[in-house]
Amino acid sequence: MTSNSLNLKDEISAFLTKNAGISYSAERIAHALNMDNADQFTPIIQTLAQLEREKKVRVTDKGEFEAVIKQEPITGTFHGNDKGFGFVEYDPDLPDMYVNPDHTLHALNGDTVAVKVLRPGDPAAGQGPEAQVTKIIDHNYERVVGEFKQETVGNYIGEILLKDKKLSQYRFFVTDKGLKPLDGEVVTATVTTYPSDESPQAMTGAVTEVIGNKDEPGIDILSVIYAHDVPHEFPKEAMDQANKIPLHVLPEEKKGRKDITNQPLVTIDAIESKDLDDAVVAWKMDNGHYHLGVHIADVSHYVQPGTPLDKEAFKRGTSVYLTDRVVPMLPKRLSNGICSLNPGEERLAMSCEMEIDEQGRVVKHRIFPSVMKSHARMTYKAVNRILEAHDQKTIDQYKDLVPMFETMGELHKILLKSRKRRGAIDFEAPEAKIIVDDKGHPIDIQLRDRGLAERMIESFMLAANETVAEHYFNEHVPFLYRIHETPDKDRVKAFVDFLNVFGIDVHGDINNVKPKMLQKVLKDVAGKPEEQMVQVMMLRSMQQAKYSDEELGHFGLGAKYYTHFTSPIRRYPDDTVHRLIKWYDQHGKGERAKAAWRDQLPEIAEHTSVTERRGIDTERDVDSMKKAEYMEDHVGETFDAVVSSVMKFGLFVELENTVEGLIHISVMNDDYYEYSEKHLALIGRKTHRIFQIGQPVKVRLKRVDKDLREVDFELVNPQDAPTTKIRVPHEHDNRRRGGGRRGNHGHVKRHDRRQHNGNVNNRQINRGQTRHHNNSRDHHSQGRRH
């Protein structure tokens, strides 16, 4: 075959494959390839015949030609919707595939499914691909949690009222094959049958465990722990191992370690913290530089690879901090005992000492195992009273340490300035602390202050994490990193387009976005009404931070090298990093030493990223449940709020205490409101009132549902809203939103809320869903997470 005929074969194949699903006559193919001459037509016919023989092209009933696409099975995660349809997420760089209600195979949210493509996407028309679920490979829900309602019907002894919002439209019937709980008890059950054509809204299964009565204090939080499958009871083998660990450092354990017990190290934490895993020390050097010591509990000394404690710590991945309790990664004997850097007690540590110049550059460093002693258990409040309030009583109480705290304050300002110079993005998201009584009922929601002490410790932890990451990157050895990748180009473009609507410029090449460019945007809008709106939209354009064995940098921090080294009591990756440091210290950095870790690290990175997400989701669920419970006592009251998100179906608003709720479009009675996607706004058709992110509003609390975490508001004075000259086109007047403006409010709302839900995947924006970042502290608070 000549090269010309080979080229023609490739050209025809490429054209038909690009237009898969569409058939063409030979004449149209010739025209598309600019081969309209009569003498060119014969080779086209011959090539098409050959492609047909090779089964790469088929002839349709109309005598036209179309590509034969050999479809590899595609697998992905199914994201269901209350209205029956769903989307399958299968590739981080490609749009999700739409699945219509007839083609879901009754898959549930989170199921791993196989699909076949029914229609490829058409980016030019803004149309995503459509698929059909052909097989459910793995069920996301192997068990459920909820309240048992006793009622004998046939072979069923009752029903479980499901607590999971994603399952709120399904009924779960309990068989007599398991436990026989009492009415009102919260239980877990294994799923035996899933929704099917015969029973599309039903599941069945047997009760395996009774958690407690729904009215018992703490059962609500425990049911969320169960629902997220967070391991919370230590196996006997792990507890036996923990109980054998001495409560004090033994003389033989100090061998080979640098003794730094005379250095005035201190821990600085929140008042309620009991797992103190980092201590710091600083002084001014004779050359004008600063010495910064970050000394971290050496958990890896006590938790050896392959032991029961290690297996359980890996399984948990992280400690989970809930309203009135902690689900720890390690038993208390370690987390609050021998591993906690309690004052006056000798402790084993992993140390990172840094010499930092006046520009905030680490010019020398040393990483080594040590023996230390904390000279004071300081709190953020006490250090803030010294450095910010200059409170004489507190200054007198800690007079020996005050000069060091002042030096630390100076060093923090230098480090902060250095981070800002390179473009680190600092998001100021308020964080709430929910205060509960002895029965677990929330009685107050307080905003956490991030004062100088909090920021200072954050700076020191960042410096240590970066120093350790850069050191081992330069050693060219397998290592575990914390990465935050550059935002997706499409998302950056969408964000820039959004900013342009508001007259905000982004300076620089948006195809090669740098942290400094986004930092400048935040600086430009600081203190302006649109500040919060811009911050929210910027967060939504970003990727999620995660663990990786590849160093891809940390975009949000503007850092080329980053790891997690500073919290091994509560994060398994930090413990892994300590093991790696010791391993290379003891075994060198040759090929044999590197090979021992090379294959393990991708699995550790993947698993700990998943467990971190699980922990954050659990914390978020408990927070939203307790906030809803708190608001139950305030129905009918009026509040000042800010619009936090605008959707087709209404406004999400946030109160000053961080409680978030929905003003559904069906209660916006003063006008018919239409959604402008370009402006992310709801605009009144007659009054031209506009509601956008960041806009202050006065709201009244209408309804609260603690179990569904729903808080509903209504506008008090809609007439106070600003008006706009923006007009929304009316070509879709006949399509009333949410199944009718005054339609099935409750059902619509559950679906609507899920569109806004914080657990939504980053790319779900392309299907009208948003991602909220109340908990994405990784973008701005990498040092520690309390």
Image (tube, helix red, strand yellow):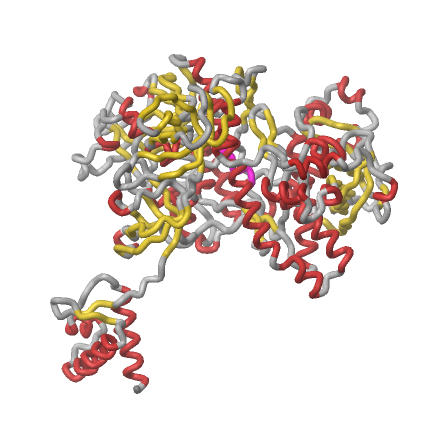
Residue 249 left/right relative to 578: right
Instruction: Quadrant for residue 435, please give it.
Output: top right
Residue drawn at 28 percent across, 72 percent down: 13
Is residue 112 in sight in this rendering?
yes
Q: Main secondary structure of the magenta part?
A: loop
Looking at this view, is 465 or 758 the one in front? 758
Q: Quadrant of the N terminus?
A: bottom left
Residue 207: % across, % down:
45, 30
Residue drawn at 64 percent across, 40 percent down: 416
- The correct choice, above or below, for 592 with respect to 92 in the image is below
- The correct choice, above or below, for 108 with respect to 594 in the image is above
Residue 667 left/right relative to 442: left
Residue at the far left: name it: 62
Q: Which residues are magenta?
A: 774-778
- Residue 624 within the magenta-colored segment of the rendering: no
Q: Quadrant of the C terminus?
A: top right
Residue drawn at 47 percent across, 49 percent down: 487
Residue 749: % across, % down:
32, 28
Residue 485: % across, % down:
52, 51
Residue 346 left/right relative to 753: right
Total tally of numbered discs in the picture: 0
Instruction: Quadrant for residue 777, please give it.
Output: top right
Looking at this view, is 466 or 316 the one in front? 316
Residue 560: % across, % down:
60, 53
- The correct choice, above or below, for 49 with respect to 244 in the image is below
Residue drawn at 39 percent across, 25 percent down: 710
Is residue 406 in sight in this rendering?
no
Residue 224 left/right relative to 236: left
- The correct choice, above or below, for 558 with respect to 590 in the image is above
